[in-house]
């Protein structure tokens, strides 16, 4: 059977259909891509389409389901690393992902409140009226089974700022949507009522990307005997990965790069499914600093002769809304993932997978860093893309890569020379 990895991109399009990852018409829609007309409807002043490579990662096994994972990324080695890590983790039973809750938080900030204590009392007494007003502003989400799940109010005194604030928070079940527009509509809907109740002025009403009511935990556990890697015994590798994880808890310079590695996976799937990656980035980094200090989002430790990895993160994503239904690549991604967008629990399933992909990417980076170093794998892949970029056929790639790795400079000109000599 022809391998996906060693095939040329045109052949991979055929393999996607042959292996039933997606239907032929979906693949055809990928060939056409996003049209300029559609882009023009999505943003202002559009005059082009900025493309990103779109590939597949394999071996993902999450909550007993196997996934082929579409990823949009411009960075070499990310997809190979994800697939390699997922393979090791799958051999140990895969990932277990758990959704804590799935609600979006939004806030109305009020200023110039004459009597804060009184205002808090009124808001708490009028909670039902406010929730009803929020629902009246966006009735369809209530019909879909969603709506406001809680309302709270907090007074922020002017200690570090010149201004004091009274902030009203809504936590809303937005069903399958990420919910930014749903929240914003509700918040603006209740703002005049809040002004009336408190005598203050609503400064703004907006969703918060600090999505602490959309937390996801993913976990994996790999026995030492499945961890052996490049002549390093499993136990030694586990100890080193555990130490690397601790470094990301105590050193902010390492923590930032540790988390960047996690985002290599998270962003690529968030983007591939048409979700808002800035929203996810903002939320995850804020969560990494939740105790006042920025730390690694994942932890790895040793337990019963196993390396255990775990990550908890806010993942405010949707399977409908925004550009999801518009973008042909986003639609193809859901088909490839075998997740039906808009179906109940689809967003939870996707969030669990995104978290697992982030943890897999983190495992791959730590494994490489504490063994052969990160550059070796990167350069090997760089050599391969150079070989392919100068036109090496599948049966020539290996030979060109071998020579390229020995060459003084690894660039396109050298790759071309090697390929020409190889063909003589
Ligand atoms: P939409 O405004 O597109 O709202 C969701 C849509 O999905 C609604 O039209 C809803 O229909 C429809 N829908 C269909 N099926 C379902 C279902 N099962 N559950 C829920 N809704 C369903 O998207 P969001 O409110 O999710 O907002 C996301 C967008 O907002 C993103 O593009 C994001 O980039 C952007 N944004 C982000 C901000 C931030 O992160 N701070 C701020 C502002 C915007 P119906 O109306 O009939 O219920």
Image (tube, helix red, strand yellow):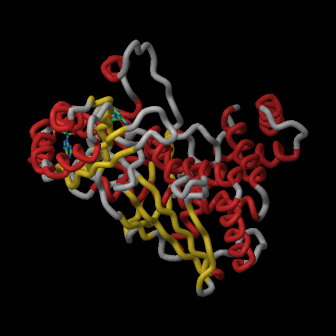
In this view, the residue farthest toward the right is 408
On screen, residue 354 versus residue 203, left or right, reads: right
Q: In which quarter of the image is the C terminus?
A: top right
> Which residue corresponds to the image point at 30% horizontal and 20% vertical from the top-left?
41
Q: Residue 242 is drawn in which quadrant?
A: bottom right
Quadrant of ligand 1: it is top left
> Which residue corresponds to the image point at 31% horizontal and 61% vertical from the top-left?
101
Depth order, front residue of 327/127: 127
Relative to 44, is 233 above or below?
below
Relative to 116, is 309 above or below?
below
Depth order, front residue of 118/37: 118
Residue 82, horizontal then vertical, whole percent: 57, 56
Q: Residue 325 is drawn in which quadrant?
A: top left
Q: Residue 114 is drawn in which quadrant?
A: top left
On screen, residue 370 versus residue 49, left or right, reads: right
Residue 218, horizontal then vertical, whole percent: 46, 66
On screen, residue 205 versus residue 382, left or right, reads: left
Residue 278, horizontal then vertical, whole percent: 46, 38
């Amino acid at each position: 059977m022809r391998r996906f990895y060693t095939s040329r991109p045109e052949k991979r399009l055929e393999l996607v259909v042959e292996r039933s990852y997606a239907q032929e018409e979906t693949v055809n829609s990928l060939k056409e891509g996003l049209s300029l007309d559609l882009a023009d409807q999505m943003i202002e002043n559009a005059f082009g389409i900025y493309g990103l490579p779109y590939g597949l990662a394999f071996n993902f096994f999450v909550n007993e389901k196997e996934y082929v994972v579409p990823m949009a990324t411009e960075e070499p080695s990310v997809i190979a690393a994800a697939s390699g890590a997922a393979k090791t983790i799958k051999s140990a039973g895969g990932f277990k992902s758990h959704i804590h809750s799935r609600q979006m938080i939004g806030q109305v900030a009020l200023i110039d409140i004459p009597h804060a204590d009184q205002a808090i009392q009124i808001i708490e007494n009028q909670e039902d009226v406010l929730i009803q007003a929020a629902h009246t502003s966006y009735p369809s989400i209530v019909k879909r089974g969603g709506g406001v799940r809680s309302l709270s109010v907090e007074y922020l005194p002017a200690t570090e700022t010149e201004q004091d604030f009274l902030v009203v928070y809504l936590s809303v079940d937005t069903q399958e949507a990420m919910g930014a527009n749903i929240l914003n509509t509700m918040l603006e809907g209740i703002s005049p009522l809040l002004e009336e109740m408190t005598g203050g002025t609503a400064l703004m009403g907006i969703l918060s990307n600090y999505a602490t009511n959309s937390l996801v935990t993913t976990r994996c556990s790999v026995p030492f005997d499945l961890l052996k890697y490049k002549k390093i015994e499993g136990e030694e590798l586990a100890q080193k990965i555990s130490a690397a994880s601790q470094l990301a808890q105590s050193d902010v310079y390492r923590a930032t790069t540790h988390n960047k590695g996690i985002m290599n996976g998270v962003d690529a799937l968030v983007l591939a499914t048409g979700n808002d990656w800035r929203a996810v980035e903002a939320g995850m980094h804020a969560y990494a600093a939740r105790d006042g200090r920025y730390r690694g989002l994942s932890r790895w430790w040793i337990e019963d002769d196993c390396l255990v990895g775990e990550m908890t993160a806010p993942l405010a994503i949707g399977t409908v809304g925004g550009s999801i239904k518009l973008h042909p690549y986003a639609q193809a991604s859901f088909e490839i993932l075998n997740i039906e967008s808009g179906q109940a629990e689809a967003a939870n399933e996707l969030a669990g997978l995104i978290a697992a992909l982030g943890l897999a990417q983190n495992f791959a980076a730590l494994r490489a860093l504490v063994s052969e170093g990160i550059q070796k794998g990167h350069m090997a892949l760089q050599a391969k893309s150079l070989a392919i970029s100068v036109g090496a056929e599948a049966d020539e790639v290996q030979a060109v890569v071998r020579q390229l790795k020995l060459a003084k400079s690894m660039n396109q000109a050298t790759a071309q020379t090697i390929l020409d000599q190889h063909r003589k």
